[in-house]
Amino acid sequence: MREFIHQLKEQVLNGYSITRENATELLSLSIEKEEDLEELLKVANEIREKFCGNFFNLCTILNAKSGKCSENCKYCAQSAYFKTAAEIYPLVMKEKALEAAKEVEAEGAHRFSLVTSGRGLNGGEKELDQLAEIYQYLQKNTELDLCASHGICSKEALQKLKDAGVKTYHHNLESSRRFYGTICTSHTFDDRVNTIKYAHEVGLQVCSGGIFGLGETEEDRIDMAFDLRELGVHSIPINILTPIPGTPLEKNEAVDPRELLKDIAIFRFILPKVSIRYAGGRVKLGEYAKLGLEGGVNSALTGNFLTTTGNTIESDKQIIKELGYEY
């Protein structure tokens, strides 16, 4: 296996795009052999160094509108279908958004995103106009790269967000096409794919990834990676399920952190040039979280998340500095 890993690494470093067969062979690596896992992570990190350098990107989000979502995604605390302890409130005022943005900017974040609950945005909606006003206000008063996460969007809505100063649109695939219908039936996998395509068409960069631990197989994760490669995304957030009481997945068992690190490393083989981003739930990796930063990960969502808490910006900066990254 070690010989195969190194041969495949050399091919990737020379411009080769690995196949599903290659990825399947990497999946066969046993996580019981710590030395083999560490070798895979080391090699993934070499690929990251070659194509991405040592810059580490830190992004932050603000839960700008919470609860009463019309969609039935089984992992989500904000779905109106489930009874959870998630807060419910309307879209925040632009002054509150700026206050949050200035705070994380002062702490060293590079990006800032508003995230709103709900199915998404279409052209002509009042909420779209309100969001455009907020983004214009943020662009005028901060130096942060602005991102947006507002669900399934029309091309017209995405154009309006771009015109307001948004640089990157975030919209996860969440899982593989095969598995997606298991976790959501109120919209389709293709609804998500089409939003990503529209975002590209209007000139936005795209941040799209998924959640590990929904009940999917490792093959589902890898299928998602190949879909993301085909879609040409710029950043891939890797979330690890935090089971929320009141949701259908509240009793999902945790996945072995070593398996998750292996799969993230394989993502780096499949997508050598993108930002692979630790996102929600990385605390589930426990003592292995730092090891992942030496296995292909080169960016992170930091601070608090939507309905769960995360690492502080300061603690993340300290860790990445120790590992030799620049930020």
Image (tube, rainbow, N blue to C red):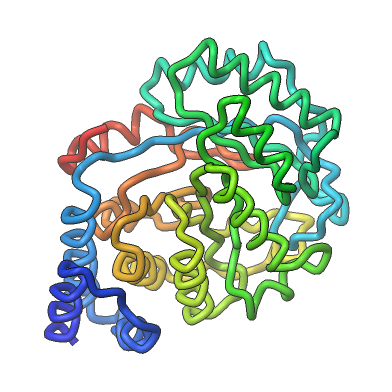
Q: Quadrant of the C terminus?
A: top left
Q: Residue at x 39, y 73 (%)?
A: 259
> On screen, 280 above or below 225?
above
Q: Residue at x 31, y 64 (%)?
A: 268
> On screen, 178 above or below 305?
below
Q: Quadrant of residue 179?
A: bottom right
Closer to the camera in the image, 150 or 259: 150
- Left or right: residue 130 versus residue 303 is right
Q: Quadrant of the N terminus?
A: bottom left
Q: Residue at x 20, y 43 (%)?
A: 54
> On screen, 94 above or below 195?
above
Q: Quadrant of residue 316?
A: top left
Q: How many callouts does the rendering have?
A: 0
- Left or right: residue 270 versus residue 34 is right
- Left or right: residue 57 versus residue 249 is left
Q: Residue at x 68, y 32 (%)?
A: 160
Closer to the camera in the image, 219 or 198: 198
Query: In the rendering, at what x and y percent does residue 102 appear?
Result: 50, 14
Query: In the rendering, at what x and y percent does residue 237 appear?
Result: 47, 52
Query: In the rendering, at what x and y percent does residue 189 appear?
Result: 69, 68
Q: Quadrant of residue 95?
A: top right
Query: In the rendering, at what x and y percent does residue 164 appear?
Result: 62, 25
> On screen, 207 above or below 317?
below
